[in-house]
Image (spheres, rainbow, N blue to C red):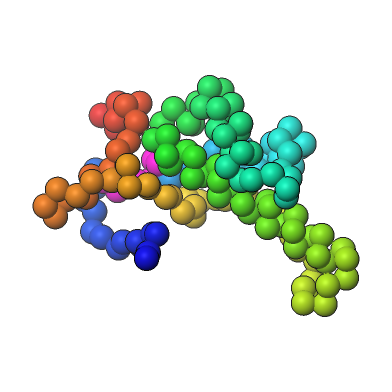
Amino acid sequence: MKLTFPYIFKVNNTQKDIIEEIMWHCEKVYNMLNYDIYQGKETILLKNSINVQSSKIYKKYRELNWHSKYLHSHTLQETILSCISDHKSYIALKEKHDKGDKSIKGEPRKPRYKNSRKIQITFTKYAIRLEGKTLKLSISKKCKKSLK
């Protein structure tokens, strides 16, 4: 059973603007969380579940981060999960490398900042609906206002 479906579709200018704005806000949220983890404001532990760690961060970012106001809640959650999973992978690889595991060739690098809208956006099934041949995305009310 497939859990994700990658789609390639043609978009008009309005849809392109919407997707680019969502990508920009996702990128900023990812980079801010990445920075907070580097500075020690957020801690990522291997023993804790990703969902447990992300729910605490999600609540904080939903209240304090203005970029999150422009994102659908599921999209924000997936962006936070992506950053946390990148850091958990880094921590696991770093521990293996420090123990002398021969399968890891070089020293792992920390997750980098995303730039120039090269971030993957994940829309859950709650944020997408298909009407005929039209793909409709749920976006926040603030995002709708900023595009007018």
**In which quadrant of the rendered image does the N terminus lie?**
bottom left
Which segment is the magenta one?
15-22
The mark tally for this picture is: 0
Q: Is residue 115 left or right of residue 34?
A: left
In this view of the protein, can residue 30 be seen by the observer? no
Q: Position of residue 128 (x, y in %)?
A: 28, 46
Q: Quadrant of residue 92?
A: bottom right
Residue sitting farthest toward the top: 63
**Can you say whether 115 is above or below 104 in the image?**
above
Could you tell me which residue is drawn at 83 percent across and 72 percent down? 101
Let me know if residue 141 appears in the view.
Answer: yes
Residue nearer the viewer, 84 or 33: 84
Q: Position of residue 56 (x, y in %)?
A: 61, 31
Relative to 143, residue 38 above or below: below
Residue occupying the point 30% across, 63% down:
8
Q: Position of residue 35 (x, y in %)?
A: 68, 40
Q: Residue at x 69, y 44 (%)?
A: 48
Q: Is residue 77 magenta?
A: no
Q: Which of the image's four quarters has the C terminus?
A: top left
Q: Main secondary structure of the magenta part?
A: helix
Task: Decide whether residue 18 is among the magenta residues.
Answer: yes
Residue 136 vertical placement versus 68 (above, below): below
Q: Determine the residue located farthest toward the left in the rendered image.
A: 132
Q: Is residue 11 above or below residue 137?
A: below
Determine whether, in the image, residue 121 is placed left or right of residue 53. left
* Along the line of sight, the residue nearer the viewer: 108 or 53: 53
Residue drawn at x 75%, y 55% as measured from the top left: 91
Image quadrant where residue 94 sits: bottom right
> Residue 75 at x, y = what percent?
43, 41
